[in-house]
Amino acid sequence: MSHSLESRTGIDGPVTVVKNYTVPSAEADYFVEVYQENARIMSAQPGFVRSRLHRPLAVGPETRFVHIAEWKSGGELDRATANPEWHASLQRMFDDPGLHVTSEPAAYRVVVELLPD
């Protein structure tokens, strides 16, 4: 399973990154702290619109976080994911002996959008 999103979208329009992270529930709060370093790096990149990390309400032996980030264009996301500082931060997170995290990244484009009337 890949830890990072090596983006080559080939899309000029807006894209959304959806990334699931799973950690043992005892490490969930620590994961949020570590995650923020990586998120700060990406938020400074050109084309970044916003990012949200979602935590489930239910408690179990594992916590599955859902990260959703919006980008102005796939090309800007492609350039951002090539940033060596971001890769180093991501590697530190996955190499941290106090954190046992798995990840499933993917980039998406909107095909249906519903808004309130």
Image: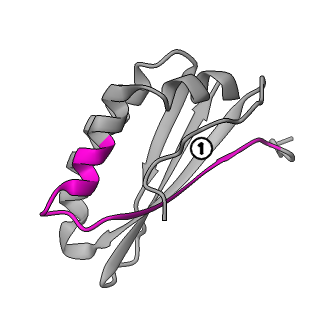
Q: Where residue 115 appears, x then y in whole percent?
A: 81, 41
Return the residue found at the far left.
98
Q: Is residue 24 left or right of residue 74?
A: left
Residue at the (20%, 67%) spot, across then down: 27
Tell me the quarter of the image containing the C terminus: top right
Residue at the (42%, 25%) spot, across then down: 83
Give the secondary structure at mark 1: strand
Relative to 8, say whether 27 is above or below: below
Relative to 59, say whether 90 is above or below: above
Colour scheme of this structure image? Answer: one colour
Q: In the rendered image, which residue does mark 1 sit on?
A: 17
Residue 3 in sight in this render: yes
Residue 73 in sight in this render: no
Residue at the (59%, 28%) spot, across then down: 77
Q: Where residue 58 appears, x then y in whole percent?
A: 40, 77
- Residue 54: quarter of image: bottom left
Reply yes or no: does residue 48 show up in magenta. Answer: no
Return the residue found at the far bottom.
61
Give the number of marks: 1
Q: Where residue 84 appears, x then y in whole percent?
A: 36, 27
- Residue 59: quarter of image: bottom left
Q: Is residue 85 left or right of residue 44?
A: left
Relative to 107, say whether 72 is above or below: above
| Neighbours of disc 1 within 10 Å: few (<14), some (14-19), many (20+) | some
Name the one closer to the observer, 77 or 27: 77
Q: Which residues are magenta?
A: 90-110
Please state which amino acid type lies under the numbered disc 1: Val
Q: Is residue 103 left or right of residue 96?
A: right
